[in-house]
Image (spheres, rainbow, N blue to C red):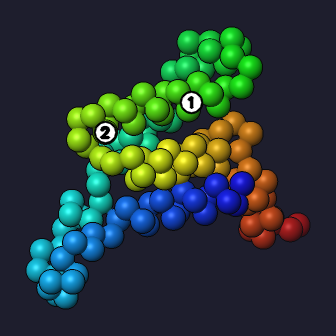
Amino acid sequence: MLTILLVMVTAVTGQTVDTTGIADAPLFHDVSVDSMINTYNIIYGALVILVGYISKALGLKAKVNNFIFVIIAGGLVLAGAFIAFGFSKALPLAFTFLGSIGFYNVFLKKDSVLPTVLKPVGNLFKKTA
């Protein structure tokens, strides 16, 4: 689980740095959020999570033995569309896919690992009578 979280953080930080002008001009003249973050990759990650929720709502989890294949298929179709329309390249989308499924497993899943990890932290703030 920690590996998935590490891949997610690496994917996000790897996409937020724009190094196109560093060799020619070491000083950044126009630093904007839009130039540093590719918004299409964030949209892609959100759509992958949405595909998972829609697939569960349609009952595909009961029909398919390994539900991750449904998510991978949805991610591949979305990635094909994003690449075909020129929104992004394949490698950043692969890292975004891994990051989005890692984000889902850590934060959004019903039986998430996060509450069990944070339980000792919650015990620190309990009042003792």
Residue at position x 25%, y 43% in the image: 87
Q: In which quarter of the image is the C terminus?
A: bottom right
Image quadrant assignment for residue 53: top right
Q: In this view, does 111 lie to the left or right of 97?
A: right
Q: Quadrant of the N terminus?
A: bottom right
Observer-side mark, 2 or 1, equals 2
Residue at position x 37%, y 32% in the image: 80
Q: Distance between the residues labelled 2 and 1?
A: 18 Å
The percent position of residue 82, horizontal first and vertical second, equals 31, 37
Asked if residue 58 can be seen in this view, the reply is: yes
Task: Pick the residue in front: 19 or 53.
Answer: 19
Q: In this view, does 118 lie to the left or right of 38?
A: right
Residue at position x 42%, y 65% in the image: 14
Callout count: 2
Mark with earlier residue (2, 1): 1
- Identify the disc placed on residue 71: 1
Q: Work out which residue is located at the far right of the displayed protein and give it.
A: 129
Amino acid type of the residue tagged 1 in the rendering:
Ile
Instruction: Identify the element where label 2 is drawn.
Output: helix
Examine the rendered structure and indicate whether residue 79 appears above or below residue 10: above
The percent position of residue 60, horizontal first and vertical second, equals 62, 15
Amino acid type of the residue tagged 2 in the rendering:
Ile
The 10 Å Cα crowd at callout 2, few under 14, some 14 to 19, many 20 or more, is some
Asked if residue 115 can be seen in this view, the reply is: no
Q: Is residue 50 left or right of residue 107?
A: left
Q: Name the residue under label 2.
A: 83
The percent position of residue 103, horizontal first and vertical second, equals 57, 49
Residue at position x 51%, y 21% in the image: 54
Examine the rendered structure and indicate whether residue 84 appears above or below residue 14: above
Q: In this view, does 97 lie to the left or right of 19?
A: right
The percent position of residue 25, horizontal first and vertical second, equals 14, 85
Task: Pick the residue in front: 13 or 122.
Answer: 13
